[in-house]
Image (cartoon, rainbow, N blue to C red):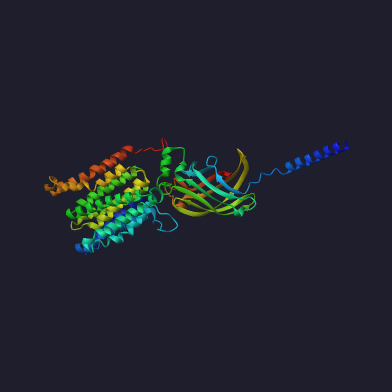
Amino acid sequence: MDGPPALLFGILVPALVTGIGLLLVTLFVTERARERHAVGAAFAAAGFLAGAAGLFGLPPLPFGDQTLTGDHWLQWTASVGVLILLFDGLRPGLAFVPRALFGAATILGVVQAMLRHHWEGPEVWTRLATLAGLLAVLVTATALLGRRVKGASVPFVLLLAATCLAVTIGLTGSAKLAQLTGIVCSSVGAAWVLTLLRPSFRLGGAGLTWAVSILFGLGLCACFYSELPVLDGLLLCAAPLAPWLAELPPLRDRSPRLRFAARAILCLLPAGFAVTRAALAFDPDPYGDYDS
Amino acid sequence: MRLLVSSLVLASTLGFFALGTSAEAPSAPVAPAGEWTIDPVHSTIHYKIKHNNASWFYGRLNDISGSFMFDEADPSSAGFAVEVKADSVDSGNEKLDQHLRSPDFFDVKQFPVISLESTSIEKAGKGYKVKGKLSLHGVTKDISFDLEHVGTGDSRGDKVIGFHTVFTIDRTDFGMDYGVGAIGSDVQLIVSIEAGQQ
């Protein structure tokens, strides 16, 4: 799907579902209850499901006649798997349990085809442990930053990183994965706008875990099954981590506005480098003098 | 002398009838029953698909392997399993091949093998009616097609046999729905198989 329908389902529908849902919740539900029931994750997932189903239809059912692709698994994890994250706020000290389970579901879904056709022997465990470690660092760092930095800064950083990921994936070869990433951008973007309108709103640990995990899964799909170079993937992983540098001296002591800008620039440095590399390698006329 | 003449007449008569018989029924050599292995060099799969609603585009799948049982006298006992490596898709343009191998089309890293396995083979006219299961892009569908036995021959002392078929699938039935509209959804497959006896 392309043109106006793609804009409708890829951008407007997820933004409206996530944005309106979260706005209503902030109007009628207390902040504590919102954190406790992981509403940020729930509405981001609802927006993603609406956008992805509108663009591509519902993915095939797991364990049916059709072998699911990595992005099919990711769509199920993003929409149904979010139920795991609803336990995130029930016992704050045990939040790592649902986050780890959600991360594991994300990775195991994406790598199904690698396990079936490409990886074998002891290296399987090394690769899985590396991916789990990387995702754990990303989720923990983003959730901690989200708790430390109030306001629009962290959703904005995540939006920048997600947008750069979508552009890089699009430039390196898969329209479908780029569109799915664009849907996540749209949901995160709606949450960011809401933080501007209602400063008391926070995406919360569960919401940030959902967004980071799904973006990580989309990046893995692009690396394993499309043509996203590993270096670009690593640069994009560094993007949500880099804003932590703004929490160190001398930036730590600067004004909130300057630190907001610093976080955005720090995020854009690695992510922008990945986009630039992809843009330079992109061939706008891939089939020579003829189009597809 | 009479004996010699009689022998010559008899030999000529037998020779005449032998020639006559051969001229009246020039049937192809009967394929010996048994197991056959596909010759990947002399077997081809071409696909044909409409492009921009304007032309027919032809491409190939190059890496074919498999084997089959065939007994001309008892076709119902026949069966085959053919595998094609999806990354052997060959359009004649490397950049287009890269796109065809991507998740937008064949998604070869997730679905590296295309397979076709027969479930029943029946004699139908001069050829055969085949029912089977085609697995492509993670989806397995029942299909049926007419199969022509092209001939049986010899190659360096070994028996070889050939089959040919043309059938059409809808690629969207197999979850390959990228670019439908500009690129047709019906794909005609033109399959020609040569196999040697094991």
Q: In this picture, is A183 found above or below B11? A: below
Left or right? Give the position of A94 relative to A289: left
Quadrant, the N terminus of chain B: top right
Quadrant, the C terminus of chain B: top right
Left or right? Give the position of A118 relative to B132: left
Quarter occupied by residue A282:
top left
* Residue B113 in picture, x, y percent from top left: 46, 48
Left or right? Give the position of B99 relative to B71: left
- Identified at 22% across, 54% down, the residue is A143
Quarter occupied by residue A174:
top left
Closer to us: A281 or A21: A281
**Residue A30 visible in the picture:** no
* Residue A184 in picture, x, y percent from top left: 30, 52
* Residue A276 in picture, x, y percent from top left: 28, 39
Closer to us: A155 or A14: A155
Residue situated furthest right in the rendering: B2
Closer to us: B105 or A50: B105
* Residue A39 in picture, x, y percent from top left: 25, 61
Left or right? Give the position of B68 relative to B93: right
- Identified at 28% across, 57% down, the residue is A100
**Residue A161 visible in the picture:** yes
Q: In this picture, is A287 found above or below B174? A: above
| Circle count | 0
- Identified at 26% across, 42% down, the residue is A272
